[in-house]
Amino acid sequence: MKINPDPSQVASALSDSKSPSTSAQASGTSGAQATAAAPAGSSIEISSASRGLQSTDATDSASFDSARVDQIKQAITQGRFQVNAHVVADKLIASAQDLVSSALAKGR
């Protein structure tokens, strides 16, 4: 299993598969800027769900700790990384309970 692919391969694969409108979104262009880049007579609208996901992405990236990721990568490479199955199981169960609770709250 390859965890860390070659970044140049990922970038070229993504750029090959993107249309002009999706590459504008991937580069961090806001909806207003993407609309300005659209051909005359067409428009692009970003749904409220999409805006919610964008704000979630911004929050998630603010909490991203690259130093911690590097520590974990090094531990995996050196064979020192150990998974605590009890912690993983507890968090998986808690996540499933949250999903069920939110689905019930929405009336599904």
Image (cartoon, grey):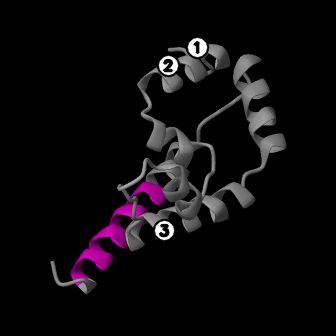
CA distance separating discs 2 and 3: 26 Å
The amino acid type of the residue labelled 3 equals Arg
Could you say whether the residue bearing mark 1 is in a helix, strand or loop?
helix
Disc number placed over residue 13 in the picture, else none: 2
Secondary element under disc 2, as helix, strand or loop, is helix
Q: Is residue 26 magenta?
A: no
Which span is picked out in magenta? 90-104
How far across and down, in percent of the image, does residue 27 sit?
A: 62, 43
Marks 2 & 1, CB-CB < 8 Å contact: yes
**Residue under numbered circle 3:** 51
User: From the viewer's perspective, is 68 left or right of 48?
Assistant: right
Q: Residue shown at 38%/60% (left/top)?
A: 93
Q: Is residue 63 visible from the viewing direction of this image? A: no
- Tags 1 and 3 touching, CB below 8 Å: no
Mark 2 is surrounded, within 10 Å at the Cα level, by few (under 14), some (14 to 19) or many (20 or more) other residues, namely few
Q: Is residue 97 magenta?
A: yes
Q: CA distance from mark 2 to mark 1?
A: 6 Å
For image coordinates 65% across by 33% down, the residue present is 82
Mark 1 residue crowding within 10 angstroms, few (<14) / some (14–19) / many (20+): few
> Which label is found at residue 100?
none
Position of residue 49 measured from the top left corner of the image (x, y, whole percent): 39, 69
